[in-house]
Image (tube, grey):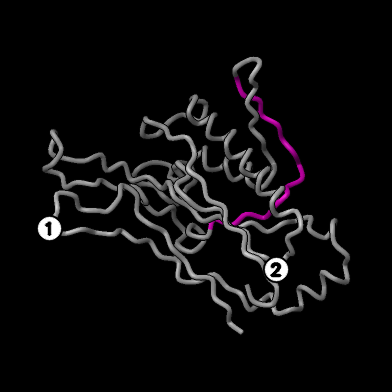
Amino acid sequence: MPNGHHLFIFTSHTQASYEHFPDITSESVRVRLSQFTEMRKFITKMTENAKSSDIILLCGDLNVNGRLNKDEGKIHSEEYKAVYSILKGNLSVVKDEKNNGFTDETSETAEYEVEDLFYNKFNEHLVTSCDLFPDDYYKDGKGKKSRKCLDYFFKFTKLNYKDNQDDQNIEENDNNSSSTLSIEDLTLNTFDVTDKKFVHLSDHYGLSLNIVDNK
């Protein structure tokens, strides 16, 4: 990256749920929340020496439906709100191997400021799931059309980076054109296919963005 900046990209594919809108107490959701806790801990470990100007991204098919229901994408689902708290560091869901359950741990102090880049851009959880085949392929004449938002780009900003660095070095680093890097061109790609039995390349739409040096 320009001027000594670093780009940290983390990607994952968490536990899926096989019901359309699972309750937040369901087994699959609890497993998924514990995976997000492990994910945040890993990100914290790997970015221990990151500067405030470094870019930290988490992206992928995270299997968390951010939409409240099929038709409402502006309001966050309960699971999404829990995941957001976990990524910030205010909540941890830890698997209790001894009792075969999960324990919730809370913290009043967050580790990160977390931005959902696509939600912030479009003011909505975009639909990222789709049917691979046209309606007439399915027995009932229609596909699932579940209209879920399962794919994300989260940007992390460390809130306590000053604790581990000299203040003078931080100021020098921050003045080192940190503001010249921007995230642009956030795009949802449907990857439509013609003249085939299937109508999309995947049952998920793609998300893409560009990191631009404006210097």
Q: Residue at 30%, 47% (x, y): give it.
A: 203
Q: Say which residue label 1 marks.
A: 195
Counting the numbered discs, the total is 2
Looking at the rendered structure, the kind of residue marked 1 is Asp
Looking at the rendered image, the quarter that the N terminus falls into is bottom right
Callout in the foreground (2, 1): 1
Q: Given the current orientation, which residue lies at the most extreme bottom position? A: 215
The image position of residue 133, as x and y in percent, is 19, 46
Q: Is residue 31 magenta?
A: no
Q: Residue at 44%, 47% (x, y): give it.
A: 61
The image position of residue 112, as x and y in percent, is 69, 52
Looking at the rendered image, the quarter that the C terminus falls into is bottom right
Left or right of residue 78, residue 132 in this image? left
- Which numbered dot is residue 94? none
Span colored in magenta:
101-116
Q: Is residue 153 above or below residue 77?
A: below
* Local SS, label 1: loop
Q: Say which residue label 2 marks.
A: 53
Looking at the rendered structure, the kind of residue marked 2 is Ser
Q: Residues within 10 Å of mark 2 (few under 14, many from 20)?
A: many
